[in-house]
Image (tube, rainbow, N blue to C red):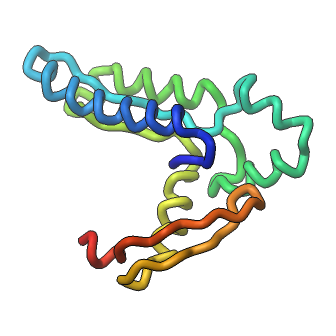
Amino acid sequence: MGFATSWAQTAAKQGVVGLTQVAALEYSAKGIRINAVGPGFIHTPMVIRLEGDAARLAALVAAHPLGRLGRPEEAAELAAGLSSDKASFVAGAYYPVDGGYLSRQRSESRARVCTGRSGLLTQAVDEEPFELVCLFSVDEVR
């Protein structure tokens, strides 16, 4: 999930997904499993800065189906589990640790389906309007 002005972070996260898949293909035959854990909004110093802005923090929490931000140990537990023998058949996968945030975003984006012709959609993100030029419909992509 990308955000306006977060070009570098979005590119980096997508790069990690691709590198994870390629590395899994290259190293699986050697018995090395490669997976990626993608923490979402985790209660870390970067996110704690929002505590000074109660309205913005509340909006961020409300954007998560689980109704809260994640804890660092939750991402660590997943990484530990993927590293264990209990995940011995797991390779090349990306696991978001995000309290359902990406699922909600994907569901909402599917609801805003283009009409099959170029068009202009406007929606609010962080209470700032932005425009999205639609070049195809979801049916055309399938």
Above or below — where is 59 with respect to 140? above
Q: Position of residue 8 (x, y in %)?
A: 52, 32
Above or below — where is 71 with respect to 131? above
Q: Position of residue 70 (x, y in %)?
A: 65, 37
Residue drawn at 20 percent across, 17 percent down? 32
- Which quadrant of the figure has residue 105? bottom right
Above or below — where is 80 with respect to 57? above
Is 84 positioned to the left or the right of 134 in the image? left
- Which quadrant of the figure has residue 84? top left
Q: How many numbered marks appear?
A: 0
Residue drawn at 71 percent across, 46 percent down? 68
Residue drawn at 50 percent across, 76 percent down? 111
Above or below — where is 71 with respect to 104? above
Q: Position of residue 58 (x, y in %)?
A: 82, 51
Residue drawn at 50 percent across, 26 percent down? 77
User: What residue occupies the far left of the structure in this picture?
Assistant: 29
Q: Position of residue 54 (x, y in %)?
A: 90, 45
Is 49 positioned to the left or the right of 37 in the image? right
